[in-house]
Amino acid sequence: MYNLGSIGIVGGGQMGEALLHGLIESGFVTSDKIMVSEPDEDRCQYLSEKYCILIAHNAESLTENCSTVIFAVKPQVMSSALKQFCKCITEKHLILSIAAGISIKSLEEVLGKEMRIVRVMPNTPALVLAGASALSKNSMATREDMEYALGIFSAIGTCVELEEKLLDAVTGLSGSGPGYVFAFIEAMIDGGVLAGLPRPVAEKLVLQTVYGSVKLALESGDPPAVLKGRVTSPGGTTITGLQVLEESGFRGAVMTAIESAAERSRELGQ
């Protein structure tokens, strides 16, 4: 019994849980409209008890009860997941994939070119409903399909629609971006310790500084260069610190890191 509006999630790991948590928390769907397929029985029990969602014990059960199927599995297990579900998926299903590096063409080769497919590149802050996701659709997916997919991923953060050829750049920027940010945060904490602060104090101050800076940028709408200028007084401490970063090639290193990560994404997708 094909259930219009029900969402099936293949994979109950961190990203799968982030999705179902966001969908329920935002009110996008109710828990009885979500079904999860997950091989780990303990994980299934945990998700079922915490979120009151349904568990699919096989591919047939999930595809018969859900109109949208989200593949929230790691790229290395995507092939086996697709093989398990390809015989059960029909043209009535909307297929979403968050497996990094798995192209729409690769999905079509297994599922069929007539299938409606949306490829998504999310990032790990989705785990706290603050993700950044980019979505691309194939030619068979309709405008309504894309709007529905955007609604799903808006439940776990911010999302944008892009051409698929730009998803490697997204991977290098927002997909890998949390890693760069955490490295910067760690370096700032160490800097605070070097300057004489107790580590717990340095960590507390750094986390709030980064959070507050991002919040200010989001809510003010001003470009980062303008915000930086407001805290950089002539001959002051901030411009002195920025000089050291510039002499160390800070901005160039960040730009090269993003470019390199994007290129690596392209390599992995081939």
Image (cartoon, rainbow, N blue to C red):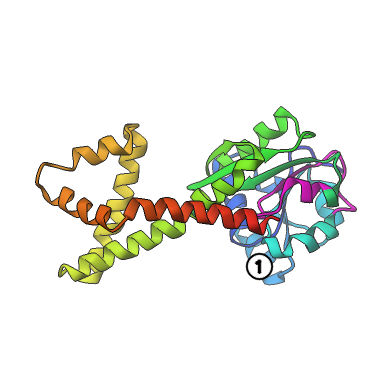
Give me the residue at 80% from left, 63% from top. 80
User: Quadrant of the rendered structure where residue 67 is?
Assistant: top right
Q: Left or right of 132: which side holds 1? A: right
Point out residue 172 in the picture as x, y percentages from the top left corner.
52, 52
Residue 206 vertical placement versus 107 (above, below): below
Which is more toward the observer, 8 or 212?
Answer: 212
- Screen quadrant of the C terminus: bottom right
Residue 139 vertical placement versus 238 (above, below): above
Which is more toward the observer, 202 or 25?
Answer: 202
Point out residue 120 in the picture as x, y percentages from the top left corner.
64, 46
Q: Which residue extends farthest top?
A: 143
Total label count?
Answer: 1
Which is more toward the observer, 25 or 37?
Answer: 37
Give me the residue at 23% from left, 65% from top. 191
**Which secondary structure is most common in the magenta stretch?**
loop
Point out residue 170 in the picture as x, y percentages from the top left corner.
55, 46
Residue 246 vertical placement versus 225 (above, below): below
Q: Is residue 88 magenta?
A: yes
Q: Left or right of 152: which side holds 137? A: right
Count neighbours of disc 1 (C-alpha within 10 A) and say few if under 14, some if 14 to 19, many if 20 or more.
few
Residue type at mark 1 is: Arg
Q: Is residue 209 magenta?
A: no
Q: Which residue extends farthest right?
A: 87
Question: What are the residue bounds of the magenta stretch?
Answer: 86-108
Give me the residue at 10% from left, 42% from top. 234
- Screen quadrant of the N terminus: top right
Query: Is any atom of residue 183 visible in this view?
Result: yes
Q: Left or right of 208: which side holds 10? A: right
The residue beneath circle 1 is: 43
Q: Which residue extends farthest left?
A: 235
